[in-house]
Image: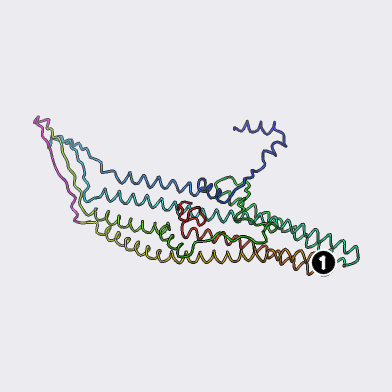
């Protein structure tokens, strides 16, 4: 709308309505939905897709042959009176056009592979950002819960002080702990805001949109909702299977093979330049003084006396040798990367299983017993505060372990270039 319309809207619309209109949108989003949305709207991917069109235009350029040439010679002076209208067509020899087309076609495939590599990088970043947002919201809820628990602790201390069971120092200390819990709200709230902004940016949407992660299967982070006997994490294929998949589907390995092919194309193109081109020419001669006409036919050939393009051939062969060496190094590196990522996932799995099956249930029991013991005068305030801090530390460690697992899982998916929990064991590589 124009600025006049906008001003009129602000003047005529009630304040309450404008405030309601300004409310940020709340979107429920599962992880797979976030990955799909990033595939469509991520700014980096949108920009990278344009490079495909640039590379494809290079194929059209490579297939174009040399233009013909039209000449007109008109003498100046009395020494020569002939006018010559000539036509010349260069002809490329040595397979130059075919070599250019092969190189341009491989460069187009290179751009496509680079786009696929970027897709997997964006996929990893979205997974991490989604996990960070889910964890930040869970930590925010947990902080609010700790504020409520500390309010209850203050009330217990107040009642025990009124009954003469504790000194006033207990009430002062519990109020201090409550204020510290309140102070933790701001950084936890800001962590949610920052995580939301990052995920919005990756999804290519305005940063004012609030996202609610709803993937309960992977991100059930509520301490209270954890089952007593949590189910096992989704099973991974074994390491050998993952390494075999990686050798077939690793995009950077395919890119290294393509780079080697491009170096072969460059050698062929350089060698084709060593074959001299020819030009076929023809012309019409007219002498107005003698009133005679004639025809002209000719062939022109470049002589490679001073530059036979051997330097370009040597340079292309050096690049060819380098591409072969880089491919060999990368093939050796693939197995190591998959093995390292696999071990990271297994280690994170063990930590999460210990958190969910042992430490989280025990932490709830410890906190409940500590509070009840203080409430009934069986222990002092220091004991309950120490227990409460230990429980908080364990919950923070749990959230970090969830993020570590999701990051490790994304790294392993990228290492094998395949979603690990797809419906089919050998799903397509496009995320």
Provide residue 158's location: percent of width, then percent of height: 86, 61
First to last magenta residue range:
287-305
On whether residue 299 falls in the magenta region, the answer is: yes
Q: Is residue 164 left or right of residue 98?
A: right
Residue drawn 22% across the image and 47% down it: 92
Q: Secondary structure at mark 1?
A: helix
Compared to 98, does 408 lie above or below? below
Q: Is residue 183 left or right of residue 232?
A: right
Q: Quadrant of residue 91?
A: top left
Quarter of the N terminus within the rendering = top right
- Label 1 crowd (10 A; few <14 / some 14-19 / many >=20): many
In terms of depth relative to the viewer, which is nearer, 158 or 428?
A: 428
In terms of depth relative to the viewer, which is nearer, 228 or 383?
A: 228
Q: Quadrant of residue 160?
A: bottom right
Q: Is residue 316 left or right of residue 277?
A: right
In this figure, which residue is indicated by the disc labeled 1?
Answer: 374
């Amino acid at each position: 709308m124009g600025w006049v319309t906008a001003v009129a809207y602000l003047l005529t619309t009630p304040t309450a309505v404008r405030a309601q209109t300004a409310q940020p949108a709340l979107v429920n989003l599962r992880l797979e939905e976030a990955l799909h949305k990033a595939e469509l709207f991520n700014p980096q991917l949108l920009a990278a897709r344009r490079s495909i069109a640039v590379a494809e235009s290079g194929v059209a350029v490579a297939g174009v042959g040399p233009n013909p040439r039209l000449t007109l010679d008109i003498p100046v002076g009395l020494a020569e009176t002939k006018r010559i209208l000539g036509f010349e067509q260069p002809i490329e020899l040595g397979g130059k056009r075919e070599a250019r087309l092969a190189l341009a076609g491989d460069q187009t495939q290179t751009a496509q592979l680079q786009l696929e590599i970027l897709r997997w990088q964006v996929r990893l970043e979205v997974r991490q950002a989604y996990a960070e947002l889910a964890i930040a919201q869970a930590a925010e809820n947990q902080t609010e819960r700790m504020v409520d628990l500390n309010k209850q602790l203050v009330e217990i201390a107040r009642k025990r002080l009124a009954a003469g069971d504790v000194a006033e120092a207990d009430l002062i200390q519990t109020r201090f702990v409550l204020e510290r819990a309140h102070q933790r709200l701001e950084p936890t709230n800001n962590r949610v805001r920052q995580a939301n902004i990052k995920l919005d940016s990756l999804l290519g949407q305005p940063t004012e949109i609030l996202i609610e992660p709803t993937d309960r299967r992977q991100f059930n982070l509520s301490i209270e909702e954890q089952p007593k006997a949590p189910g096992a994490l989704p099973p991974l294929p074994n390491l050998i299977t993952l390494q075999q998949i990686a050798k077939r589907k690793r995009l950077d390995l395919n890119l290294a093979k393509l780079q080697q092919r491009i170096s072969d194309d460059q050698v062929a193109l350089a060698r084709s330049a060593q074959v001299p081109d020819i030009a076929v020419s023809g012309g019409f001669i007219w002498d107005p003084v003698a009133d005679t006409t004639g025809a002209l036919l000719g062939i022109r050939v470049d002589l490679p006396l001073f530059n036979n393009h051997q330097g370009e051939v040597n340079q292309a062969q050096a690049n060819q040798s380098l591409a072969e060496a880089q491919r060999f190094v990368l093939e050796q590196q693939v197995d190591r990367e998959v093995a390292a990522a696999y071990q990271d996932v297994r280690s994170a799995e063990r930590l999460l299983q210990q958190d969910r099956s042992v430490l989280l249930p025990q932490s709830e029991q410890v906190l409940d017993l500590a509070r009840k013991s203080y409430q009934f005068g069986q222990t002092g305030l220091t004991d309950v505060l120490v227990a409460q801090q230990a429980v908080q530390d364990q919950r923070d460690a749990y959230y970090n372990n969830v993020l570590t697992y999701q990051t490790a899982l994304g790294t392993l998916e990228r290492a094998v270039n395949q979603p690990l929990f797809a419906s089919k064991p050998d799903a397509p590589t496009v995320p």
